[in-house]
């Protein structure tokens, strides 16, 4: 289709050179189109749009069945809560040992006083200190075990949380929305059909801001620059033409060869450069419509 449009534009350009009409280049009106595709798999429950409808950015227009995703989300929520509930209370489980250590410390201090008074033996003091060291070792081992258990449970809960976020993202992608403010050009699917990731659902474009793709010869490039204001003439057939202000937004860096059927006196005219001119659409301009541009 683009090649056909190109041939038409170049043919018109060549004809213009022969007829010496009041324009510098010819071309067609185009727009940046966006094809909206399904991002998840499932039955299309709703797709409320028709060709020609006007949509606003972010507008909800449909949804893909999310039953399985919703059930999986609930399952992950339950597993995550169960994992978090099994996390050990380190302070509570270590409380008994800490109490024994505190008691043994008092016992060591008491035996130490008795030893100073000659009422206890050195062996009793050594045994008390050994008992205190054992209790401290048991506390360290308990804290290490509980800490590892908590870390393992925490990692498991975090993995479940990541899975939940992934499901939430898939649920979000199941909602079909308009990516921009514009008009629906083509509709490719209907409610009740099965969608797969990447399947086109509809195509839309911003028809309020179109651009005119035209072609200039190499000798004309010296008169062109980005941001330049030009006049675009839309041809509606017969003698009906309308002029629109336009602005050059893009100039091709490389030339293109014109088709062999196009004859030019200057061999250099066999090379043309594509140019885009931004035009504000008043509602009359249609995509693929022929036009002319005057510098």
Image (spheres, rainbow, N blue to C red):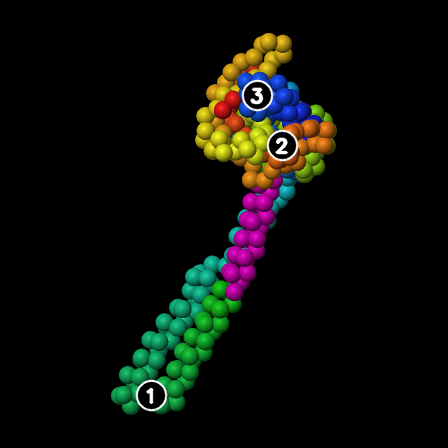
Image quarter in which the N terminus is found: top right
Q: Secondary structure at mark 3?
A: strand
Residue occupying image coordinates x 51% and y 26%: 278
The residue identified by callout 3 is 292
The CA span between labels 2 and 3 is 22 Å
Q: Are marks 1 and 3 in contact (CB under 8 Å)?
A: no
- Residue 79 to residue 22: above or below: below
Where in the figure is residue 112, as x and y percent of width and height? 31, 84
The CA span between labels 1 and 3 is 115 Å
Look at discs 2 and 3 and give the one toward the viewer.
Answer: 2
Q: Earlier in the sequence, mark 2 or mark 3?
A: 2
Where in the figure is residue 218, as x and y percent of width and height? 57, 34
Q: Is residue 290 magenta?
A: no
Residue occupying image coordinates x 72% and y 29%: 261
Where in the figure is residue 95, as x and y percent of width and height? 42, 64
From which residue to which does the magenta span run? 148-170
The residue identified by callout 1 is 120
Q: Earlier in the sequence, mark 1 or mark 3?
A: 1
The residue identified by callout 2 is 266
Residue 5 quadrant: top right
Q: Secondary structure at mark 2?
A: loop
- Residue 78 to residue 60: above or below: below
């Amino acid at each position: 289709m683009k090649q056909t449009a190109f041939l038409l534009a170049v043919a018109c350009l060549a004809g213009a050179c022969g007829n010496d009409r009041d324009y510098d280049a010819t071309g067609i009106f185009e727009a940046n189109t966006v094809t909206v595709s399904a991002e998840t798999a499932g039955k299309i429950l709703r797709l409320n749009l028709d060709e020609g409808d006007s949509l606003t950015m972010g507008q909800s227009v449909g949804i893909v069945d999310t039953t399985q995703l919703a059930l999986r989300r609930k399952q992950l929520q339950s597993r995550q809560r169960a994992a978090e509930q099994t996390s050990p209370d380190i302070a509570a489980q270590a409380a008994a040992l800490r109490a024994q250590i505190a008691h043994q410390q008092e016992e060591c201090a008491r035996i130490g006083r008795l030893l100073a008074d000659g009422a206890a033996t050195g062996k009793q003091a050594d045994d008390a200190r050994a008992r205190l060291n054992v209790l401290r070792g048991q506390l360290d081992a308990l804290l290490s075990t509980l800490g590892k258990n908590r870390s393992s449970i925490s990692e498991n809960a975090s993995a479940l949380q990541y899975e939940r976020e992934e499901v939430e993202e898939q649920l979000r992608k199941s909602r079909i929305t308009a990516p921009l403010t514009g008009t629906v050009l083509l509709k490719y699917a209907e409610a009740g059909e099965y969608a797969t990731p990447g399947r086109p659902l509809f195509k839309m474009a911003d028809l309020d801001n179109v651009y005119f793709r035209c072609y200039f010869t190499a000798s004309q490039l010296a008169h062109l620059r980005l941001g330049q204001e030009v006049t675009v003439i839309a041809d509606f057939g017969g003698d009906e033409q309308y002029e629109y202000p336009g602005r050059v937004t893009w100039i091709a860096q490389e030339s293109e060869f014109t088709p062999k059927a196009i004859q030019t006196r200057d061999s250099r005219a066999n090379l043309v450069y594509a140019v885009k001119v931004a035009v504000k659409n008043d509602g009359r301009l249609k995509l693929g419509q022929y036009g002319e541009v005057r510098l």
